[in-house]
Amino acid sequence: MVGMLGGQCQLNFATISTAIPHVRAGKLRALAVTSDKRSVAAPEYPTLAEAGVPGYNHASWIGLFAPAKTPQAVIARLNAEAIKAAHSQEVKTLLIGDGLEATGTTPGEFAAIVSTEIAKWMKVTKAANITAP
């Protein structure tokens, strides 16, 4: 982002929460979002697929994790409270202001998302021959 704002680079794949303040201030121009659907916070920007790059889908996400042996009752309670917070108007308004959107999932749905992401990025790192030091 520093390179973009300083004119040292011409393209950046940034999180919407990082880029949107600079776009709104007129310092950057947004071309598209990388998710498979338009952003609720900035629906005027097309997806990359709509902009002519089909099959591209990457969305940032944040999740809650707990130790593996956490009792199911505790997981259920934490999940219920997190969903309640994510769906509150106060949180939605705060997040959308930063270009983010809270969805909320079940623990099983979130585990599936994490598994899919791990598989996707393992494939990318292997194809690029990226290894840990």
Image (tube, rainbow, N blue to C red):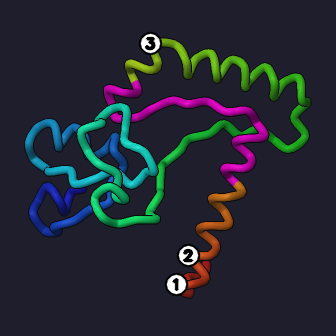
Mark on residue 71?
none
Mark 3 sits on what residue?
A: 90
Verify whether residue 129 appears in magenta: no
Residue annotated with mark 1: 128
Residue drawn at x 32%, y 55% as measured from the top left: 50
Q: Residues within 10 Å of mark 2 (few under 14, many from 20)?
A: few
Q: Nearer the viewer, residue 32 or 114?
A: 32
Q: Amino acid at mark 3?
A: Glu
Q: Which residue is mark 2?
A: 124
Q: Earlier in the sequence, mark 2 or mark 3?
A: 3
With 88 as the anchor, is 117 left or right in this view? right
Point out the stretch of residues depicted in magenta.
95-114
How far is mark 2 from mark 3, CA to CA? 37 Å
30 sits to left or right of 38? left
Q: How many marks?
A: 3
Q: Residue at x 9, y 63 (%)?
A: 7
C-beta proximity under 8 Å, tags 2 and 1: yes
Residue at the image position 29 percent from the left and 36 percent from the top? 42
